[in-house]
Image (tube, rainbow, N blue to C red):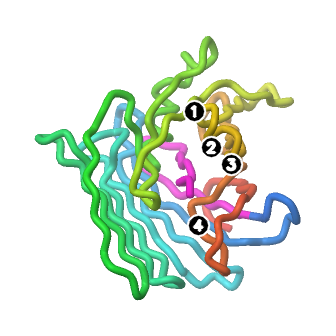
Amino acid sequence: MFPVLLWTQNVLGGDLFGTATDLKTGEFRYSERHSISRGEDNLTKMIRADYLTKDGKVFASMTSDFTEDSFLPEIKFQDSRFSISENQVYDRKQKKLILSKTEKNGEPQRKELIVIDNMVSGQGFNNFLLANFDSLEKKAIQFNFVVLSNMDFYRFEIGLGKSGNIDERAFVLGPGNFLFRMFFHPIEVAYDVKSKRLLRYKGLSNILSDAGKSQEVLITYKEGGP
């Protein structure tokens, strides 16, 4: 699963609402409600995300705290449908990530990863992209992305995509490993050029389907509520 990227429009904070539909059929899958704050440096400092059913019931939530690092947040994720709990803590002193995961009727899992150059995790990718927003016009950038649900990291590359709208800037994210690329569909995101707010996300979701399977979605975002 790949965590979805988030952004907001003002310095002190704001709300962002997203609607996820099945990439192939266009059917509703879930909605997202985000409360986001960022600092004077324009980078996100805290995100609270709730995931809702069609009738508005919250079934999953995730918080990302960027106090320790702009790209490697402390993460707490829960999905009540499957009794899934995932957590990430960044130990800056020892330069390592401590990952833990618990699933229904399963043994708790724990893993430590040594932090290396250009390592990004979860919603920290949005800060990473925004920090490189202009330089990505010139060349693609490789980085190491931590996928908490898999308790591991992978080499990825982000570069410019194609957009038919001059008010938008599109980016394409794909694996840096050739063999991995054969099994992974690229992720596409589109941002508003002026506000740098996320407009669309297309690709693998960080939320499992009701059947407990991975799913590809198209998410459209707008400021405020539904």
Residue 122 x/y as whole percent: 45, 50
The residues bearing labels 3 and 4 have C-alpha atoms spaced at a distance of 13 Å
The residues bearing labels 1 and 4 have C-alpha atoms spaced at a distance of 24 Å
User: Amino acid type of disc 2?
Assistant: Leu
Q: Nearer the viewer, residue 151 or 162?
A: 151
Q: Is residue 77 visible?
A: yes
Q: If the image is split into quadrants, where does the C terminus sit?
A: bottom right
* Residue at image location 34% in from the left, 39% down from the top: 70
User: Amino acid type of disc 1?
Assistant: Asn
Judge whether residue 7 is colored magenta.
yes
Q: Nearer the viewer, mark 2 or mark 1?
A: 1
Q: Nearer the viewer, mark 3 or mark 1?
A: 1
Residue 204 shown left or right of residue 96 in the figure: right
Q: Which corner quadrant of the image does residue 198 belong to?
A: top right
Q: Nearer the viewer, mark 3 or mark 2?
A: 3
Q: Which residue is mark 1?
A: 177
Q: Nearer the viewer, residue 130 or 120?
A: 120
Q: Which residue is mark 4?
A: 207
The residues bearing labels 2 and 4 have C-alpha atoms spaced at a distance of 18 Å
